[in-house]
Amino acid sequence: MERTALEAVQAEAVFREVVRLCVELVLAGDEDLLKTPGAVRTVYDPARGTGGMLSVCDELVRERNDKAQLVLFGQELNPESWAVCHAEMLVKGQDPARIASGSTLSADGAADRRFALMLANPPFGVDWSDDYEAVKAEHEQLGSDGRFGAGYPRKSDGAMLFLQTMLAKMKSPEKNGDSRIAIIFNASPLFTGGPGSGENAIREWILTNDWLEAVVALPEQIFYNTGLATFIWVLSARKEPHRKNKVQLIDARDLWEPMPRSLGNKRRRLSLDHITQVLDLWRDVKEDGKRSKVRSTTFFGYRRATLERALRLRYRAGEAAVEVLREQPGYQKLAETEPELQDTLVEALRVKDGLNTTDRAEAEAAVERALGPRKLTATTKRIVWAALSVRDSRAPAVPQANGEPEPDPELRDVELVPLDDDLDEYFEREVATFVDDAWFSDGGETKVGWELPVSRLFFRSRPPRSLEDIEGELATIAAEVDALRPKLEDQRAAVLAHAVRGRPRNARLGFVGRWLSGGTPARDDPANWLHEVPWAS
């Protein structure tokens, strides 16, 4: 999962205000550090880069409590970034030996340590195949005693592995310990991966353990190396009582000011006032109707229930059925084994041209009479029924052997039923109200998924513009275009006059004629247009 030193510098050099917000959110839950003389905290960054996040954290703490001490730890894969970070540790009077080199995922440089504060900006969407075997082995051998007991994400994006590493290094609340985490993600960890996936298992592990405190949606175009949406996850080993079993979502997507000058993809930045607004929302822990929403942890869980609808068929023969028959692969294969059976089937469907019924027994009897003594295999029967059958919503449901309706694969759908919602009540409210032949297969208790739909929860619909407004705007634009026409014609004539100046009369006439007409025959004769540009003669 290596990124170059240049990429690391670019990623950190222009987003200090985002780092500051991360640090403020972590420190906001540790007031003792900012007030108590002699307070000591360990700080860890598993994807340290050149050390930007820990440096900002150290600076902010020193500004507010110069008697406090931070002990900085981290790890970095890129050798150049690691060297820069080493130098910065020396300048700050920190022990550079606390910055491990190599991959955090496959060679944890702080395996036996626990930290009070943790910050990270792991690379987004970076393949971690090189670390896969080590991560898989730790998952299988150590289980919940290791970092990756909950599972691991797909190989195309290993960002969540860094969060799992940080969570494994939290201090135990049972031993009066506390840890706070802030990590920057793109949108992918919020919802990528459905029930049964590694990402879903990780989200479930985080939410059911009640570690997630808040998610802050940041403005787009705020990073140097990506213009995509980004989010800060804030986690705590020991939530305050009023935050227990709750997750706060904060929408800061429109809290930005334009950069005086663009830097790569970074065209926006957070001001100190914007950071203060986010911190105030975080402290209030309540819904404000616009920027802050608070939901229970179980709100983010859902049951993935398969919704079935009854299969309803009409049976008809004739040329339409013959065409469907000939398109089926099973029928086409008969040409190699039983070509005479192909002719028999076609003739049987043509003989019963008038067949048009919703009664399967009637259709079966008609086909058997057309086939005579010829008996069909189960495979051939399926071919024939596929040709005869067309879906008809007004037809009765096709019964199975047990008398229950046969489900229609084409109408099969999936409902995401919130964990907080009663399944039967949900069905009556959201399904039975609209269709009367549906049911949940397996009772709807199939798979459980977890996601954090931040953007959906903050979506604000905008009514479409009125037709009168649109027509008025079009009329204004048309008037502006009409006002420009005389000026454009004058400019056109001036260009033509300049182009033909000094040429013989016949050459002038030919040039102007081609210009005006584009070769139109009606304009080939100068007499048809010369009055428009008399200077051409």
Image (tube, rainbow, N blue to C red):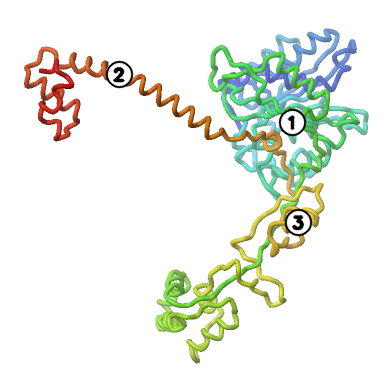
Which of label 3 and label 2 is nearer to you? Answer: 2
Q: Residue at x 73, y 27 (%)?
A: 291
User: Label 1 to label 2, Cα distance in Å?
Assistant: 58 Å
Q: Which mark is residue 486?
A: 2
In the rendered image, is residue 333 in sight? no
Q: Is residue 400 left or right of residue 481?
A: right
Q: Earlier in the sequence, mark 1 or mark 2?
A: 1
> Does 312 sit above or below residue 191?
below
Which residue lies under the disc numbered 1?
215
Residue 240: x, y in percent?
Answer: 89, 29
Residue closest to the eye, 264 or 301: 301
Residue 181 as seen in the image, left or right of residue 407: right
Give whichever of discs 3 and 1 has the lower sequence position.
1
Residue 427, numbered label = 3
Decide: is 226 above or below 399.
above
Q: Specify few, some or many for label 1: CA neighbours under 10 Å numbering under 14, 14-19, or 20 or more.
A: many
Looking at the rendered image, the disc whose residue lies closer to the viewer, 3 or 1, is: 3
Who's the residue at 75% across and 33% down the image?
165
